[in-house]
Amino acid sequence: MASLYALIAIVGVVWVPFINGALQCGSAKVREGGCPEFYDTIIRHIGGADEAACAMECQSEDTCVGFVLSKSAKPGCWLFKAGCTQGGNLDKYEYFDFHRCSCSDSLCKNGATCTEAGFGVQCKCTGGWEGETCSERYCPKELGYCLRSDGKDQNSGVVKKNSLDGKTKERQDSCLEQCRAYPGATGCEVIWDRSNRGCYVHTKDVARGNGKDKYSCWAFGQCQDMVANGGKFCPKEAGYCVKHNGKDQNSGVVKLNKIDGSTQNAQEECLSLCQAHPGATGCEIIWSLGSRGCYAHTKEVARGNGKNNHSCWVFSSCVQSN
């Protein structure tokens, strides 16, 4: 560690918007110079972490004011508390300072509640919104690694963001935010308790997770508006409701009315009827077809299949309103 006595960086500004549940205002500035007080001010070392992951870990430490990031092929960083001054020059490291904001910056959107958290602010979303400022539509998280639309594993266009174990909610939230910020992202995948653990961005076709343990997948094409009902917000998916194996669910279906379901009012009324039906597991509405109307499902349903003139709600995917 003695080689870290002096550190150098390319001076610049880096935006670090969402760290472990807290929103950072302004920038994480890269400054020249090292930390002669290395042994007095270091908090801990984070192996296998990139810039975003190091920032997340820094935010989790109350005394952390910055970190030194390795510029070598092997990623990692050292977290620091206050007291570092500029030192000598080596071209192996970068030093990041944090500049954070308060609730007065009005960064939380769509009725979110803002609270100051550590060195930043935290937005508590409501109404089916999520993301760093509660400006992102709900995106369902599916168990398993991400598959293409044809059901095959998607190994093309995958970018690894970090090697951190993704078992905790904080790590998964951070991974999702990194993926959403990546240009051209189509989905996100996080892995834990495996040798290939970490956060991955997808940039090619992904449709759903395959149900495997120790993986989670977000297919951005499935991010959707939420319909409020009964104190919960339920994601509405295009298509008729299918089972986990992709087959149509024709058992345990109860027709509740014959109203054409093309309007928002008709869909909200249908959802209310379904949620009031004993033992309902989902809801389906159809329009502009001979089978138009509202249907309650009472057997297994997993998702909509994307077909036109149908919408599906899977009640196990509903989230409680804040």
Image (tube, grey):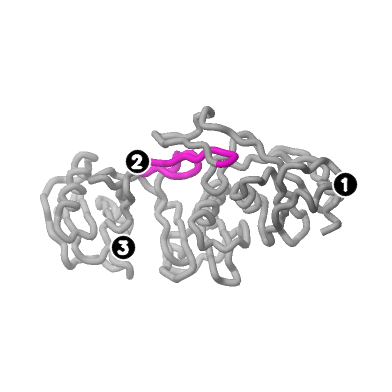
Position of residue 69 relative to residue 133, above or below, is: below
Side of 136 where 245 appears, left or right: left
**Residue that appears at 28% across and 43% down:** 228
Q: Residue 59: give x, y in percent of width and height.
A: 61, 47
Q: Residue 157: give x, y in percent of width and height.
A: 58, 59
Q: Residue 91: give x, y in percent of width and height.
A: 84, 50
Residue linked to disc 2: 127
Mark 3 → mark 2, Cα distance in angstroms:
22 Å
Side of 48 where 183 appears, left or right: left
The kind of residue on which mark 1 rests is Asn
Res 33 → quadrant: top right
Q: Secondary structure at mark 1?
A: loop
Side of 312 where 26 appears, left or right: right
Residue linked to disc 3: 302
Q: Which residues are magenta?
A: 118-136
Foreground tag (1 vs 3): 1
As drawn, the label of residue 130 is none
The kind of residue on which mark 3 rests is Ala
State which tag comes first along the sequence, 3 or 2. 2
Mark 1 → mark 2, Cα distance in angstroms:
50 Å
Q: Secondary structure at mark 2?
A: loop
Q: Are marks 1 and 3 in contact (CB under 8 Å)?
A: no
**Residue that appears at 65% across and 45% down:** 63
The kind of residue on which mark 2 rests is Gly
Numbered disc total: 3
Residue linked to disc 1: 89
Q: Are marks 1 and 2 in contact (CB under 8 Å)?
A: no
Mark 3 burial class by Cα count in 10 Å: few <14, some 14-19, many 20+? many
Q: Residue 308: give x, y in percent of width and height.
A: 28, 52
Mark 1 burial class by Cα count in 10 Å: few <14, some 14-19, many 20+? some
State which tag comes first along the sequence, 1 or 2. 1
Residue 119 magenta-drawn?
yes
